[in-house]
Amino acid sequence: MNRIITLCTAAAISGLAVAQPTLTAANNVPSGGDVFSVSIGTSTNNGTPGANQLWGFWALMETGAHDIRYYDASVSGSSASMPTATLLGTDGGTDTAWYAVTANGLEQVGERTSLGLAPYSDGILRVKYPCTYNTAWSDNSFATYTTFGQNVTRTGTIDALADGYGTLQLPSGEFTNVLRVYARQVIDDQSILATVHRTFDSYYFYVDTVPFPILKFSTDTTIFSGGSPAVSRSAEWMYGVHVGIGELGNNISFQLYPNPANELVTLDLTAFGGRPVVLSVTDALGRVVLNENVRAAARHTLDTQAFAPGCYTATITDAIGARNTVRFVRE
C-alpha cells in the first residue's frame, strides 16, 4: 500500500519557526455534526516535554479505526440530567461524554459507559482556555450513579500541563506548531461491593486548526479492591492511511502542486489515461468542500482561494474504480 504524505511539514514550510499554539474555545471545541476518523494502535513512547521538540511517531502501526462523532446535547434524552451540557461526543459504542464550555474551558459534565450513566454534580475541566505552552490546571470532580443495582460514589481529580510544543511526525506526514498536553486523571468508584481505583495518564497533541487531538497516547491503570494493577496502553491518531477492500490494486498515483498552496493548484492526472474523473476535496474535519466532475485532461487547475487555511484531502476517482488521494495544505 502506498504511503500518503501530508505536507503540513517543516520541510514544506521551510524557513518558518515553530510557533507556540494557543487553544481557545474558538479553535478547540468541536461542533455538533463534526466527525473525526481515528486510527487505533499501541505505543510505549510518549515523547519528551519541552520547546521546539521533534516527536517522531511516523512508525505507528494501525490495528483498527473508528469515528468519533459530536452532536448537540439536546439530541439525547439523557442530557436532561446534565442541564449545562451543550455537546456530546461518542465512539458509536457504549462510551459517550457530555461537555459544557465554561469561562474556564471545556468541562466534562457527564458520561455513559458500560457501567451506566453518570451525571457529574461537579464537572471535570478537560482543557483550560486559553491553553498554551506551560499552561497548567487542576480540578476535582464528583458524581453518583447506579450500576447493577448498586449505588456508586465517584470522586476524581485531574492535573494537567501543556508541557511541550514542536513538530509531530505521524504515518501520514509532519505537522508543525503542535502543542502537547499531559493530563493525569484519578478516579475512585466506591460501592458496598467494591472499590475501583483508576489512573489515566494521557498525552494529547493539538494543532490550533483542528478541534480534536490529532494524536493521543493513554495508559490506563486499574486496581480492583486493592488487587494487582491491570495496565493497558493505547494510541489514537488522525489522518491514518485507510484502504478499503474495493480499492486494493486500483490505486493510481497523481500529483498536486504547489504544496503548500496559496491560490491555484495544479493536479497532474496523466496516470488516469485521459479518462473523466470525479474530484472531491475534504477538510480536516472530513467535510466535503468541493465535489466536481473533471473532463478528460492531463492537468486540472483547482482554485483554493475560497478555502480556509488548513489541511485538505483531494481524492480522484474514475469510472472504472481507480482512485487515490493526496493531502495538501492551504496557507
Image (cartoon, grey):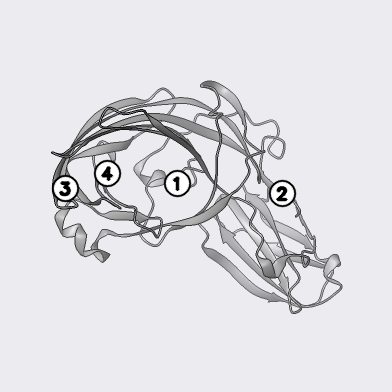
Callout 1 amino acid: Phe
First-in-chain label (2 vs 3): 3
Extreme top residue here? 50
Of the numbered discs 2 and 4, the one sitting upstream in the chain is 4
Looking at the image, which residue is at 35% across and 60% down?
A: 32
Q: What's the residue at 50%, 56% (across, down)? A: 66
C-alpha gap between disc 2 and disc 1: 24 Å
Say which element carries label 4.
strand
User: Mark 1 Cα within 10 Å, few/some/many (few <14, many 20+)?
Assistant: many
Badge 3 crowding class, 10 Å Cα cut-off, few under 14, some 14 to 19, many 20 or more, is some
- Frontmost of labels 2 and 3 is 3
Tell me which amino acid carries mark 3.
Tyr
Q: As rendered, which of 151 and 8 lies closer to the eye?
A: 151
Q: Is residue 328 above or below residue 319?
A: above
Q: Which residue is mark 4?
A: 108
> Which numbered tag is attached to residue 259?
2
Task: Name the mark nearer the viewer: 4 or 1.
Answer: 4
Q: Are marks 2 and 4 in contact (CB under 8 Å)?
A: no
Q: Residue 147 got which mark?
A: none
For disc 3, the marked residue is 145
